[in-house]
């Protein structure tokens, strides 16, 4: 995906807006994780598990025509809180609230960061190993592209819908590992050709309640 940039350096007002933006990211992530872990603590029972996870993203875009030309992955992180509700011995529902760094690279780096809410059905094929599928609701909190000493906005959409597919292995100690693919279902930007997120992620987490 190629988007032209204006010449010149990044202005101080833009940097100040970025500082405020990242403070909001930290605040939203902290508040959201607290709501998951403590706000739902009254529901604590054998049927619920609460935890946290963090990991790495390899993110790019999918599209037609020029969006397929020269785009490479942006590497970033994700982190946040996890709630798992048991339905039966084979089936659980897992909700997460995550800060996720997404986007892609071509001549410049396109930084699209989100607060994501994935809700996955987790089916255990053997003890500890579950296959996951479900929707993900994303809310854009950062929208910049940077390169050649300049920064600007992509004017990305505020909401993103995706499907998630993955697997998770849970150890008896509460530790779990997870691999997941996020396939965008809606365009993340209004443009002449489609552009959807495609994110491969790997996580390590721990259930502590």
Image (tube, helix red, strand yellow):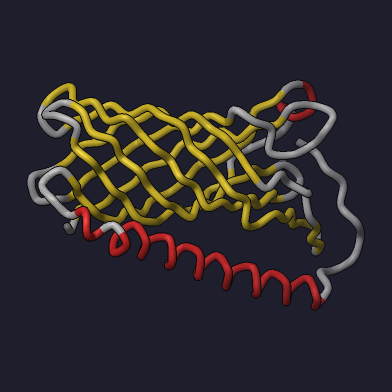
The quarter holding residue 30 reads bottom left
Q: At x 35% / y 43%, what residue is drawn?
A: 95
Which percent across, then down, holds residue 38? 29, 64
Residue 127 lies left or right of residue 140; in this view the side is left
Q: Nearer the viewer, residue 152 or 97?
A: 97
Measured as percent of width and height from the top left, residue 191 is found at 82, 34
Picture coordinates of residue 192, whole percent (x, y): 84, 29
Q: Is residue 179 above or below residue 11?
A: above
Give the side of residue 199 with respect to residue 45, left or right: right
Q: Which quarter of the rendering shows the N terminus?
A: top right
Give the residue at x 14% y 34%.
128
The quadrant of the image that shows the C terminus is: bottom left
112 to the left or right of 153? left
* Residue at image point 23% right, 25% down: 123
Place of residue 176 in the rendered image (x, y in percent of width and height, measured from the top left): 21, 45
Question: Between 109 and 45, which is closer to the camera in this rendering?
Answer: 45
Q: Residue furthest front?
A: 42
Residue 51: image quadrant is bottom left
User: Looking at the image, how many numbered discs can be counted on the residues?
Assistant: 0
Query: Quadrant location of residue 36?
Result: bottom left
**Left or right: where does residue 155 sit relative to residue 36?**
right
Could you tell me which residue is drawn at 79 percent across and 61 percent down? Answer: 151
Q: Is residue 21 above or below residue 168?
A: below
Above or below, 169 against 38 in this view is above
Nearer to us in this view, 162 or 5: 162
């Amino acid at each position: 995906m190629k988007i032209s940039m204006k010449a010149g350096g990044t202005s101080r007002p833009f940097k100040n807006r970025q500082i405020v933006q990242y403070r909001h990211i930290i605040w939203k992530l902290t508040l959201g994780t607290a709501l998951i872990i403590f706000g739902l603590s009254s529901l604590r029972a054998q049927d619920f598990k609460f935890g946290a996870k963090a990991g790495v993203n390899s993110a790019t875009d999918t599209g037609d025509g020029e969006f397929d030309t020269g785009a490479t992955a942006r590497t970033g992180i994700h982190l946040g809180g996890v709630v798992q509700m048991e339905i039966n011995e084979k089936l659980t529902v897992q909700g997460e609230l995550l800060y996720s760094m997404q986007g892609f690279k071509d001549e410049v780096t396109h930084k699209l960061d989100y607060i994501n809410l994935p809700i996955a059905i987790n089916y255990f094929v053997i003890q500890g190993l579950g296959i996951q599928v479900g929707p993900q609701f994303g809310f854009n909190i950062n929208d910049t592209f940077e390169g050649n000493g300049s920064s600007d906005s992509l004017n990305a959409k505020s909401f993103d819908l995706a499907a998630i597919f993955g697997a998770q292995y849970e150890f008896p100690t509460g530790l779990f590992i997870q691999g997941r693919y996020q396939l965008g279902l809606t365009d993340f930007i209004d443009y002449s050709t489609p552009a959807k997120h495609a994110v491969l992620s790997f996580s390590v987490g721990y259930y502590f309640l």
